Image (cartoon, rainbow, N blue to C red):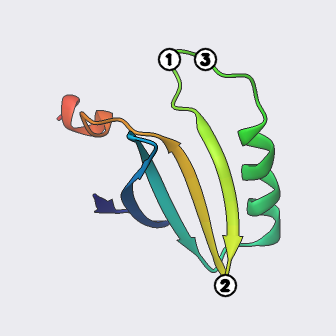
Amino acid sequence: MGQGRFGIIYKAKKNDALYAAKVLIDVKEKTIDNLTRTVKLPHHENITNHLDVIAQDEKLWLFMELCELGDLKKYFE
């Protein structure tokens, strides 16, 4: 789907539902802890929800709701 400053974003599918899967490489331990806490926060309808965090082979996979219309940046240009 795209590449950003912190990693690559893929479109993921599970049980016919689509999600965004962001892969972060060379992540610091503090960042992993912060993201893990974020997943546990209450959900809000106006904020993209983080669904899961998986650490694997020096990569951090962050699964979140998919925003199919892209990021907000294009609306402010």
Element type where label 2 sits in the image: loop
The residue labelled by disc 1 is 46
Residue 68 is labelled as: none
Frontmost of labels 1 and 2 is: 2
Q: Residues within 10 Å of mark 1 (few under 14, many from 20)?
A: few
Q: Where does the image place residue 23, in percent across and percent down from the top left?
A: 51, 67
User: How many numbered badges does the structure rendering display?
Assistant: 3
The residue labelled by disc 2 is 57
The residue labelled by disc 3 is 44
Label 2 sits on what residue type? Asp
**Residue drawn at (62%, 41%) of the image:** 51
* Alpha-carbon span between mark 1 and mark 2: 33 Å
Left or right: where does residue 39 sit relative to residue 66? right
Residue 39 sits in quarter? top right
Q: Where does the image place residue 9, in percent across and percent down from the top left?
A: 39, 60
Element type where label 1 sits in the image: loop
Q: Where does the image place residue 69, in percent across and percent down from the top left?
A: 24, 33
Label 1 sits on what residue type? Asn
Left or right: where does residue 11 sit relative to residue 40? left
